[in-house]
Image (cartoon, rainbow, N blue to C red):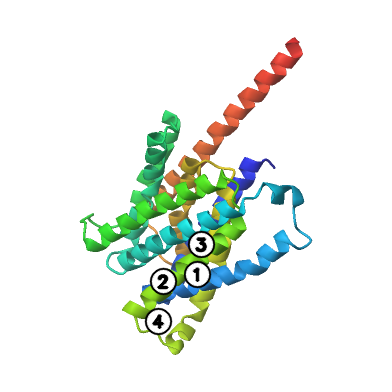
């Protein structure tokens, strides 16, 4: 399996976990406030990664060749910056969700599908027309999947929109520090601790959490903390090491599709033909984007083989 395939698989698993975690996150809001919930899940996500870091850096799974290429300075710096962005993005998203519908929030959050290639364009990473078409197809599919009523913009929608721009910045920052040799797992752990510090401060200032309320939301916090934070966000960082930001944003947009499908399969939520069509469009866009890369690689390999035969 190639490194790019491994990266895409990690991002696909990330999207699946985030999508299935949506139910847990929504349920958790019935017991605690957004800052309390986010603080608890980030603390848990960081704690879960500590033994993983020890195992991979000092235990039997230690890769000495990879360890030599790791920059501790860039890892710490990247983790802190990612943590600040994640804190702002998650907080805005959680607050916005409480003020708008879940469908509209899911669609607006996915605006990073378009925002990421635009940012790449302005930093002189031009994308082919085909990639832009795939992004637009995915965007249209998410609209069909998520928006179930008239699209009137309210304050909650704008707050979620701001969070989408923050998640765009999060994707780009991860790409930057991956290219500088940051340790993905350690950077993820640092980002959770950083986000948890700021969210805990916000929790104490704006909310009055009780131990009983937190304990009542324990199962949703455990799933979001271990799976959505500890596993999925770490896989995002590791997966982006082998995938460009635009392709990564396309794959991670499947989060909304997995959320809808899990609700349909596990919670018996109804899905209209329009929503099914939206799922198909998003899947098609992601697959087309990957097929283009495979066709390009096959042509290059064929050309190399032809040159060697000619020689």
CA gap, disc 1 and disc 4: 17 Å
CA gap, disc 1 and disc 3: 9 Å
On the image, the x and y values in percent for residue 91 come to 37, 66
**Are discs 3 and 2 less than 8 Å apart at CB?**
no
The residue that mark 1 highlights is: 42
**Are discs 4 and 3 less than 8 Å apart at CB?**
no
Q: Nearer the viewer, mark 1 or mark 4?
A: 1
CA gap, disc 4 and disc 3: 25 Å
Q: Mark 1 vs mark 2: which is more N-terminal?
A: 1
Mark 1, residues whose alpha carbon is within 10 Å: few (<14), some, or many (≥20)?
many
Dividing the picture into quadrants, the one containing residue 222 is bottom right
Mark 4, residues whose alpha carbon is within 10 Å: few (<14), some, or many (≥20)?
some
Q: Secondary structure at mark 4?
A: loop
Q: Nearer the viewer, residue 150 or 34?
A: 34
Q: Nearer the viewer, mark 2 or mark 4?
A: 2
Q: Which mark is residue 191?
A: 3
CA gap, disc 1 and disc 2: 9 Å
Q: Mark 2 vs mark 4: which is more N-terminal?
A: 4
Q: Mark 1 vs mark 4: which is more N-terminal?
A: 4
The residue that mark 4 highlights is: 31
Q: Is residue 186 above or below residue 197?
A: above
Name the outermost residue toward the top.
Answer: 310
Mark 2, residues whose alpha carbon is within 10 Å: few (<14), some, or many (≥20)?
many
Q: Which mark is residue 156?
A: none
Q: Mark 3 vs mark 2: which is more N-terminal?
A: 3
């Amino acid at each position: 399996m190639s490194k790019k395939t491994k990266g895409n698989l990690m991002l696909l698993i990330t999207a699946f976990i985030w999508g299935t975690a949506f139910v847990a996150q929504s349920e958790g809001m019935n017991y605690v406030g957004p800052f309390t919930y986010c603080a608890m899940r980030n603390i848990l996500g960081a704690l879960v990664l500590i033994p993983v870091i020890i195992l991979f850096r000092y235990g039997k799974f230690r890769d000495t060749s990879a360890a030599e290429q790791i920059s501790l300075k860039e890892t710490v710096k990247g983790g802190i910056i990612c943590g600040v962005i994640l804190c702002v993005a998650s907080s805005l998203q959680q607050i916005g969700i409480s003020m708008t519908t879940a469908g509209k929030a899911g669609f607006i959050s996915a605006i990073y599908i378009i925002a990421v290639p635009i940012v790449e364009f302005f930093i002189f990473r031009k994308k082919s027309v085909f990639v832009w078409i795939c992004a637009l197809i995915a965007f249209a599919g998410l609209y069909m999947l998520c928006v179930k009523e008239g699209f009137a913009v309210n304050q909650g929608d704008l707050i979620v929109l701001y969070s989408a721009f923050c998640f765009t910045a999060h994707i780009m920052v991860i790409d930057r520090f991956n290219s500088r040799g940051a340790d993905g797992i350690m950077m993820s752990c640092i980002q959770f601790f950083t986000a948890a510090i700021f969210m805990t401060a916000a929790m104490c200032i704006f909310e009055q959490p009780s131990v009983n309320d937190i304990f009542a939301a324990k199962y949703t916090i455990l799933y979001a903390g271990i799976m959505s934070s500890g596993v999925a966000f770490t896989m995002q960082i590791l997966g982006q090491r082998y995938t460009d930001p635009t392709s990564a944003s396309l794959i991670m947009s499947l989060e909304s599709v997995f959320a809808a499908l899990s609700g349909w399969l596990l919670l018996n939520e109804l899905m209209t033909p329009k929503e099914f069509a939206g799922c198909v469009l998003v899947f098609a866009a992601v697959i087309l984007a990957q097929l283009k890369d495979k066709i390009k690689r096959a042509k290059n390999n064929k050309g190399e083989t032809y040159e060697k035969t000619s020689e």
